[in-house]
Image (cartoon, grey):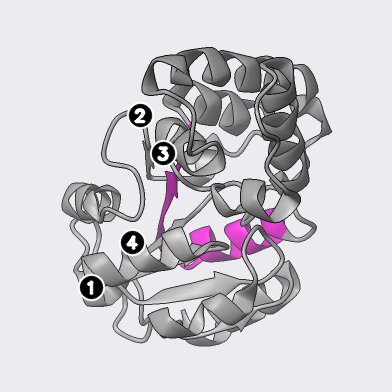
């Protein structure tokens, strides 16, 4: 790895995926609800379904349908994947995402993804959006611990040689920000994803961006 100029505050910037870079919150909510309907289970509200975004699939289902017996989680997971795969073409990057990633790469930041998606799901998304070239490393919930456990960030920092104080986590949920706090890593929240931004304050984010344009501008000035 090459040394980074000291004028930059962060060497490594780690992004959540759904609701942070990709405008996928609404689709995920609808797919969770459709899977529950398929199995005649109580259908979580939009708020309940959005809360679980960012968690690994098993943890997400446990929160979304708390009374579901453990042995039925795989069945519900299959129905969720069925609906998601059928409609994933509807998901688009938030406007300005490509410009932001290009700016950060030009400044030689290490970029990473820390997501509750599966490895197969993230790989497909990276390839379909042609974003793989931007990221130096990625971690998914099915290959390490799910958020808010800090293991994803610990692994990314260890692989890339970044110190916690020189690492930034960016996400749209309290799961992302709590993971950052657990890892001793500064964080930035975005309000345009799954969780209400008034829940972010307890994690002391450096900034809360209300649009991709705001996030890009803050990173240019403070990243």
Q: Quick check: 109 left or right of 83?
A: left
Q: Position of residue 8 (x, y in %)?
A: 38, 81
Q: Residue visible at 64% across and 46% down?
A: 49
Asked which secondary structure carries label 1, the reply is: loop
Q: Name the residue under label 3.
A: 59
Classify mark 1: residues with Cα within 10 Å, few (<14), some (14-19) or many (20+).
some
Q: Residue visible at 45% across and 44% down?
A: 55
Q: Name the residue under label 1.
A: 184
One can see residue 4 in this view? no
Q: Magenta stretch?
A: 97-117
**Which corner quadrant of the image does residue 121 belong to?**
top right
Q: Distance between the residues labelled 4 and 1?
A: 9 Å
Asked which secondary structure carries label 4, the reply is: helix
Q: Which mark is residue 211?
A: none
Query: Is label 3 or label 1 in front?
Result: 3
Q: Mark 4 points at which residue?
A: 179
Q: Which of marks 3 and 1 is nearer the N terminus?
A: 3
Q: Name the residue under label 2.
A: 142
Labelled pair 3, 1 in contact (Cβ < 8 Å): no
Query: Is label 2 or label 3 in front?
Result: 3
Labelled pair 4, 2 in contact (Cβ < 8 Å): no
């Amino acid at each position: 790895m090459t040394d980074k100029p000291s004028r930059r505050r962060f060497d490594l910037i780690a992004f959540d995926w759904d609701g942070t870079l990709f405008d996928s919150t609404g689709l995920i909510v609808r797919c969770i609800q459709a899977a529950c309907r398929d199995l005649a289970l109580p259908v979580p509200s939009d708020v309940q379904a959005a809360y679980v975004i960012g968690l690994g699939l098993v943890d997400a289902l446990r929160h979304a349908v708390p009374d579901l017996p453990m042995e039925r989680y795989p069945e519900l997971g299959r129905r969720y994947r069925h609906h998601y795969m059928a409609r994933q073409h509807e998901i688009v990057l938030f406007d300005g995402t490509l410009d932001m990633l290009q700016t950060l790469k030009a400044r030689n930041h290490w970029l990473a993804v820390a997501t509750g998606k599966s490895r197969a799901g993230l790989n497909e998304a990276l390839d379909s959006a042609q974003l793989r070239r931007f990221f130096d490393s990625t971690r998914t919930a099915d290959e390490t611990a799910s958020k808010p456990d800090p293991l994803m960030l610990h692994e990314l920092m260890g692989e890339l040689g970044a110190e916690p104080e020189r690492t930034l986590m960016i996400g749209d949920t309290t799961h992302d920000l709590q993971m950052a706090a657990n890892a001793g890593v500064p964080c930035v929240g975005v309000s345009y994803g799954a969780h209400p931004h008034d829940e972010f304050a307890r994690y002391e984010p450096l900034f809360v961006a209300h649009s991709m344009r705001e996030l890009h501008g803050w990173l240019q000035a403070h990243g």
